């Protein structure tokens, strides 16, 4: 990896503003961006990217969003015809419990949309930033 000296801070560290976790083999795993961390109304911090990854499965794509006025995160879930939208709350509860997440990380509001409606970047990659921005505009 080649890094120019212009991006290395005075403390000698290369700051990417990525949030990482370290697994049991001491490997770094990028779980989100610092810019996608938000402080909820009660003062708890959540990382929207990390929660989006946690609540995304093989059969549904989840975009978690929140504003500083929210007590809990919200989600937009994109599903295809194989998923019953009535089951999503139970699926989320199972994921929450199985992963030992804190109460303030529990998704309280779920909007279900068809997977065909997810906005794309250049027709390929889902544009989660746009989904979050549009969802927040509708709230406030």
Image (cartoon, rainbow, N blue to C red):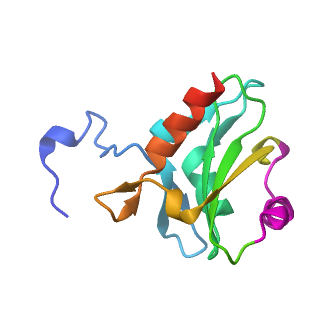
Q: Is residue 88 shown in magenta?
A: yes
Q: How many marks?
A: 0
Q: Is residue 45 left or right of residue 116?
A: right
Where's the C terminus, which quadrant?
top right
Q: Residue at x 55, y 51 (%)?
A: 49
Where is residue 62 drawn, in percent x and y?
62, 58
Q: Quadrant of residue 129?
A: top left
Q: Is residue 112 left or right of residue 136?
A: right
Q: Is residue 6 shown in magenta?
A: no
Q: Main secondary structure of the magenta part?
A: helix
Q: Is residue 102 left or right of residue 24?
A: right
Q: Residue at x 87, y 64 (%)?
A: 90
Q: Residue at x 58, y 37 (%)?
A: 135
Residue interval drawn in magenta: 84-103
Q: Quadrant of residue 44?
A: top right
Where is residue 128 drawn, in percent x and y?
48, 50
Q: Is residue 133 left or right of residue 4?
A: right
Where's the N terminus, which quadrant?
bottom left
């Amino acid at each position: 990896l080649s890094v120019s000296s212009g991006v290395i801070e005075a403390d000698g560290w290369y700051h990417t503003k990525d949030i990482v976790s370290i697994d049991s083999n001491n490997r770094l795993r990028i779980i989100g961006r610092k810019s996608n961390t938000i402080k909820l109304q009660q003062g708890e911090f959540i990382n929207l990217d990390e929660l989006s990854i946690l609540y995304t499965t093989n059969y549904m794509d989840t975009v978690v969003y929140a504003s500083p006025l929210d007590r809990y995160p919200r989600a937009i879930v994109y599903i295809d015809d194989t998923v019953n939208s009535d089951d999503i709350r139970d699926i989320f509860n199972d994921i929450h419990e199985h992963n030992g997440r804190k109460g303030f990380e529990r998704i309280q509001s779920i909007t279900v949309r068809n997977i065909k409606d997810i906005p794309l970047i250049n027709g390929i990659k889902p544009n989660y930033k746009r989904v979050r921005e549009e969802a927040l505009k509708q709230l406030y």
